[in-house]
Image (tube, rainbow, N blue to C red):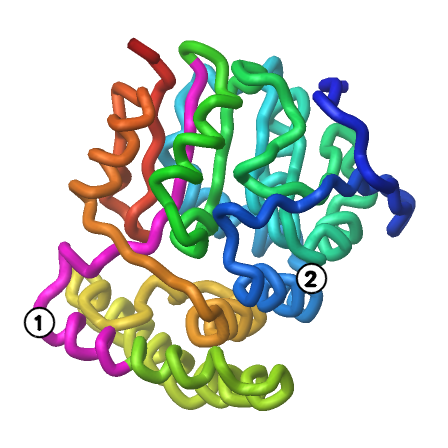
Amino acid sequence: MIKFTKQPVRILKEFGKSISCFNIQKFNIDEKTVYSFGEEWNKFNSFTEKEISDIGQQYFDILPPEINKDSLVLDVGCGTGRWSKYLSDKVKWIDAVDPSNAVFAAAKLLSETNNVRVSQASADDLPFESGTFDLVMSVGVLHHIPDTQQALADITTKAKQGGFVYVYLYYALDNRGQLFRVIFKLTNAMRFFISKLPSFMKKLACEVIAFLIYLPLVGISYLFKRIFKNSKLWEKIPLSFYVGTSLKVIRNDALDRFGTPLEQRFTKQQVVEMMEQVGLRDITVSNNMPYWHAIGKRVDN
């Protein structure tokens, strides 16, 4: 087990798992967004093995062979812990951290996963020595932090020289046409207002969106995929990424998309440039959905 660099302020016991809680720094954090995610992940806090496996294969298609049964992993912004769960049988050890109350959901999901430790800490004050981990990952998190570039720099220091840093950052629709961009502007305006609603109304609005917008578009994408079997036309339909995913994942992501106060988006080129600025090289950005997920090797000058 990896040693902490400081003592936790308290240790909680949930679902048979100890959660080490550290002081949350507020220099590079949006408190409303952290609170929102705590609510979200405690609402959607269970996934089947198949759901985790299916979505994990999509997100980690670019994981290098160097990440194996001997690897030490840091999961920054672990949420429910589903990414740690997916990798737990593929690596030696995982430290899963999150600044929100999502750590309780993670403790539940990972209660029987002995090689994953859950802690409450922020990305700008991680309680680990620099150069500790073979893989540092942050999946769908850094774009919800005010200074994404700084957050990336902070987590990169925890990777070993020659180790890897994996991120998933919301894309700026740079590989999409004008229609997608118009739709995004409309949905972003909706998010601006919905994210400010009281908790109950926000959740209700996101449920309505999941059933009346997400599901119909996913259904149309599925039909196009079945009808035009030798074409990628179905992938051009908004929300086609969710074809084959469960209703629970769709509802979860609708709440994520429209209920989160702070959201930033980046082009593929911006993702590469940010990774290069923190000392990552040999960067691979997947051309598969979700856009953009990328990995790079830490090689400081």
The picture quadrant where one finds residue 152 is top left
x then y, percent, for residue 166: 41, 33
Compared to residue 1, the image places residue 43 above or below, namely below
Mark count: 2
x then y, percent, for residue 158: 52, 22
Residue count near mark 2 (Cα–Cα under 10 Å), binned few <14, some 14–19, many ≥20: some
x then y, percent, for residue 160: 49, 14
Amino acid type of disc 1? Gln
Amino acid type of disc 2? Asn
The picture quadrant where one finds residue 83 is top right
**In what quadrant of the picture does the C terminus appear?**
top left
Q: Is any atom of residue 231 visible in this view?
A: no
Kindly identify which numbered label has been placed on residue 45.
2
Task: Looking at the picture, tell me which residue is in the foreground, 35 or 15.
Answer: 35
Q: Is any atom of residue 168 visible in this view?
A: yes
At x 32% / y 37%, what residue is drawn? Answer: 294
Magenta residues span 163-186
Is residue 84 shown left or right of residue 269?
right
**Residue 265 sits inside the magenta stretch:** no
Residue annotated with mark 1: 178
x then y, percent, for residue 87: 59, 34
Is residue 227 shown left or right of residue 177?
right
Compared to residue 14, the image places residue 234 above or below, namely below
Residue count near mark 1 (Cα–Cα under 10 Å), binned few <14, some 14–19, many ≥20: few
Say what secondary structure mark 2 lies in: loop
At x 39% / y 38%, what residue is drawn? Answer: 150
**Residue 168 sits inside the magenta stretch:** yes
Compared to residue 250, the image places residue 93 above or below, namely above
Cα–Cα span, label 1 and label 2? 36 Å
The picture quadrant where one finds residue 32 is bottom right
At x 42% / y 28%, what residue is drawn? Answer: 165
Q: Mark 1 or mark 2, which has the lower sequence index?
A: 2
